[in-house]
């Protein structure tokens, strides 16, 4: 499972590739419309598609309010940092389609032409996405990406080759056929988060006692001992045999506040699954250290919250921007460092990506 850092935001690589693919689709459809339609019609259709995309984006962001209302109520900032994930994306696509056809009726644009434009755009996006996925996603779905990219490229070619192929009806029926095949084969894109793949493999099959200690991916997480907010002593090494999300945070940090309800719900869902969350508060960065306990109570956090009263752990784990999280396997090996807030979907994918 791959993540890209953009400032303090952590973005799943697949969403970034999807964004680039949408941009490619817009460029292609604009060139096609400019070549085949009069300027007035070309502008109307392109504006309709771009407005549909914006509507879809806002539905995708806002769907979190419907899918996870309790999380949004606890932390309204979730709407800024997170989306509705895969289910929200499905709603966004459906909402965009409804909007585009509703507006097309008012603009008196033939539905067949809207369908052709929509399919050309969609499969331009699909072809670009799967080509990029083939190049940049380290997963086991290489053949799926190749097949889907090939189908989509054929569809785009057929749409652009209207003069040579024949009537629009023939092209459209061919597109429909390939559409069903592609939807059937693309089921992996909307499948469960458990298909996330490993991000670190170098230390498989080796003696973990010989792995170097450090905060880089593939190294053994430095051990530490701190007090919890309740006054108990706790070591990171006490959690050996469990997958661990080590989170470094502070009460004044807005993305930390957005992340905490997601972390708590994830923790509750992972109960008895050999997964642990350790939240290390950077106490030296707090204006009022006594406010940490109140924060924990207000947010109803039940996972261990430790106090880094000396600032040593924050320095060791290079928490220069917060929140900073480390995904650690059952042998204490760091698999991923995330700078920025994580939602529940990302936590599930990260944890499921390691053995």
Image (cartoon, grey):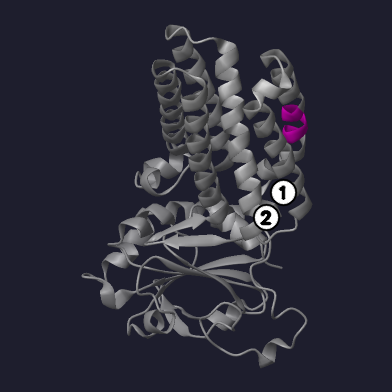
Compare residues 218 and 50 and report the one nearer the observer: 50
Query: Which of the image's four quarters has the C terminus?
Result: bottom right
Say left or right for 284 vs 274. left
Tell me where residue 67 appears, x and y as whole percent.
51, 36
Residue sitting at x 66%, y 74%: 330
Q: CA distance from mark 2 to mark 1?
A: 6 Å
Say left or right for 239 vs 63. right
Q: Give the prevailing secondary structure in the magenta stretch.
A: helix
Tell me where residue 220 appears, x and y as whole percent.
59, 84
Residue at disc 1, secondary structure: helix
**Label 2–label 1 contact, CB within 8 A:** yes
Query: Which of the image's four quarters has the N terminus?
Result: bottom right
Neighbours of disc 1 within 10 Å: few (<14), some (14-19), many (20+): many
Q: Residue 134's mark?
A: 2
Image height check: is 256 above or below 50?
Answer: below
Compare residues 333 and 280 and report the one nearer the observer: 333
Compare residues 304 and 97 and report the one nearer the observer: 97
Image height check: is 168 above or below 18?
Answer: above
| Residue 272 visible in image | no
Q: Which residues are magenta?
A: 178-183
Q: Quadrant of residue 301?
A: bottom left
Identify the residue under disc 1.
Answer: 145
């Amino acid at each position: 499972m791959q993540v890209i850092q953009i400032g303090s935001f952590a973005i799943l690589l697949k969403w970034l590739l999807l964004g680039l693919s949408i941009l490619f689709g817009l460029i292609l459809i604009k060139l096609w419309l400019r070549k085949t339609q009069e300027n007035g019609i070309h502008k109307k259709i392109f504006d309709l598609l771009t407005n549909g995309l914006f509507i879809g984006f806002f539905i995708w962001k806002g769907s979190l309010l419907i899918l996870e209302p309790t999380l949004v109520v606890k932390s309204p900032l979730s709407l800024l940092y997170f989306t509705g994930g895969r289910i929200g994306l499905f709603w966004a696509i459906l909402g965009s389609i409804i909007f585009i056809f509703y507006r097309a009726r008012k603009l008196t644009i033939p539905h067949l032409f809207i369908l052709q434009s929509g399919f050309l755009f969609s499969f331009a996006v699909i072809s670009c996405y799967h080509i990029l996925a083939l190049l940049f996603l380290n997963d086991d779905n290489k053949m799926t990406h190749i097949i889907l990219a090939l189908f989509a490229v054929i569809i785009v070619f057929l749409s652009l080759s209207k003069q040579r192929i024949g009537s629009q009806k023939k092209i459209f029926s061919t597109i429909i056929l390939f559409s069903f095949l592609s939807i059937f084969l693309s089921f992996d894109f909307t499948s469960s988060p458990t298909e996330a793949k490993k991000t670190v493999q170098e230390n498989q099959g080796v003696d973990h006692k010989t792995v170097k200690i450090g905060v880089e991916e593939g190294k053994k997480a430095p051990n530490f001992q701190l007090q919890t907010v309740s006054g108990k002593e706790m070591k990171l090494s006490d959690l050996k045999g469990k997958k661990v999300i080590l989170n470094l945070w502070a009460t004044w940090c807005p993305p930390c506040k957005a992340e905490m309800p997601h972390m708590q719900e994830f923790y509750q869902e992972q109960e008895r699954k050999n997964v642990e969350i350790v939240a290390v508060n950077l106490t030296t960065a707090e204006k009022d250290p006594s406010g940490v306990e109140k924060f924990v109570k207000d947010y109803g956090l039940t996972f261990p919250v430790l106090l880094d009263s000396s600032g040593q752990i924050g320095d060791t784990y290079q928490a220069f921007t917060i929140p900073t999280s480390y995904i650690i396997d059952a042998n204490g090996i760091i698999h991923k460092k995330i700078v920025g807030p994580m939602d529940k979907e990302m936590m599930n994918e990260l944890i499921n990506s390691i053995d």
